Amino acid sequence: MHLRPLLLSLLVLLAACGLSPVARTPTASPLSVAPLPTLMPTATVDATAAPDSGWLAAGAGAELRRLRVRVGTLEAAVSIVRLDPARVRFSVGYSPTTPPTLPEWAATAGALAVINGGFFDATGQTVALLVHAGQPVGTSYAGRGGMFAVAADGAITLRALADTPYDPAESLAEALQGWPMLVRPGGEAAYTFEDGMRDRRCALALDRAGHVLLIAAPTAVFTLAELSAWLATSDLGIITAVNLDGGASSGLMLLSATNPERIDAFTPLPIVLLALPR
């Protein structure tokens, strides 16, 4: 006879408990995850953290330098191939349908050095402009990014497209575009937007002596802003530099009997820049 009142009391108690606030861990679908902070301070980038190999002779017109750069509490390994355009010529490799690996590119072309190129889409097609053997492919970046170019007379330039846009009428033998500019003409850091994203990085640069620098940082240490700051303040004498495709695409090879280098990309590469003996 007393069960009914007891059950009613329990139901009232449970209902009251249901009105109390309950702490929950917020969840979000992948589409609603907030972006990383964009005002995160850039880590202090020291010039170097030993060891530093210095410049090592690596064949006709080529030198190799390996060093370590301190980025905040992290340390980045960096490999740099320095090339003399008077003794080395440059060619853009493009194979979107059957992209070779970095070693395959080097072997097929008989290259002295090779680095991965600019960005491409899921089908391997370039998302910017490139020129191979005088033939343009794709659409140029407008108002952003940079372009490494070899003119018909052999002159080499690396320019900011916001300053000097691509002109379809200009006579180019080879050209490759990347984004963003890391060092603007004159040697000042060009990219300061800090997104906190650390990844493997590759870059292409010119120094004050007219050398072409192929630069690879194969561990996920640098953000783009940190790489920009380091390149502009390093002892490399850089006057202009542009970012190439990074992450899994980052790769650099130097085929040298004395001081070789090999940083493999994790994926086949539809776009590369080849340095060939003259």
Image (tube, helix red, strand yellow):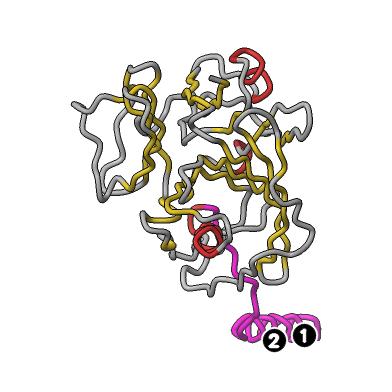
Identify the element where label 2 is drawn: helix
Q: Nearer the viewer, residue 50 or 277?
A: 277
- Say the numbered circle drawn on residue 201: none
Residue 67 position by quadrant: bottom right
Q: CA distance from mark 1 to mark 2?
A: 11 Å
Q: Which residue is mark 2?
A: 13
Give the tally of numbered discs.
2
- Residue 32 appears at what percent x and percent y? 48, 58
- Residue 177 appears at what percent x and percent y? 39, 37
Q: Residues within 10 Å of mark 2 (few under 14, many from 20)?
A: few
Q: Nearer the viewer, residue 21 or 258?
A: 258
Q: Residues within 10 Å of mark 1 (few under 14, many from 20)?
A: few
Position of residue 274 relative to residue 135, above or below, is below
Stretch in magenta: 1-30
- For image coordinates 38% across by 56% down, the residue present is 184
Position of residue 80 relative to residue 125, above or below, is below
- Residue 10 appears at what percent x and percent y? 73, 83
Residue 136 position by quadrant: top left
Q: Nearer the viewer, residue 232 or 88?
A: 88
Q: Which residue is mark 1?
A: 6
Q: Residue flagged by tag 2: what amino acid is it?
A: Leu
